[in-house]
Image: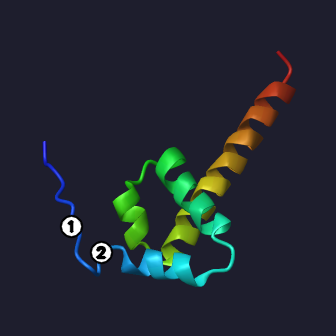
Amino acid sequence: MQTRKYYRGSDFGSFFYSELASQAKTYHLLKEAYILVHHIHFTYADVKQMSRKDRDIFINFFVEDGKREKEIRDTSRNQPK
């Protein structure tokens, strides 16, 4: 099992923190981080290093998967037995 090394350098996560500090509404950014860590199982360190575009792409994948699963559930419920 490979262990991860965590760095506390000044540039580590600097994009995430600068984006967090520059936004008037931080709730949206924190909600994105929560979804990526809790539901998609990224590490928080990975999320901090992602760009806004990367986070948006993965959240869109998550939403599309949820919609697809809902459609499958709905069609299986509506089929006659």
Task: Answer few, some or many: residues within 10 Å of disc 1's Cα (few below 14, many 20 plus, some between 14 and 19).
Answer: few
Q: How crowded is mark 2: few (under 14 residues within 10 Å), some or many (20 or more)?
A: some
For disc 1, the marked residue is 7
Find residue 13 and report its image quarter.
bottom left
Q: Residue at x 68, y 41 (%)?
A: 69
* Relative depth, front residue between 21 and 28: 21
**Residue 78 coordinates in the image, percent (x, y):** 86, 28
Q: In which quarter of the image is residue 8?
A: bottom left
Question: Please, what is the three-letter code of the amino acid marked with disc 2?
Answer: Phe
Identity of the residue drawn at 59% across and 54% down: 62
x 36%, y 63%: residue:
46
**Relative to residue 76, is residue 59 depicted above or below?**
below
Kindly identify which residue carries mark 2. 12
As drawn, 80 above or below 35: above
* Left or right of residue 69, residue 20 in this image: left
Report how far apart the C-alphas of labels 2 and 1 lie in the structure.
7 Å
Instruction: State the residue in front, 44 or 41.
Output: 44
Residue at disc 1, secondary structure: loop
**CB contact under 8 Å: marks 2 and 1:** yes
Q: Earlier in the sequence, mark 2 or mark 1?
A: 1
Identify which amino acid the numbered label 1 is placed on: Tyr
Q: Which quadrant of the view contains residue 14? A: bottom left
Q: Report helix, strand or loop for mark 2.
A: loop
Could you say where residue 70 lies in the image, as x and y percent from the top left?
A: 74, 41
x 53%, y 46%: residue:
39
For residue 80, the mark is: none
Q: Is residue 23 above or below residue 50?
A: below
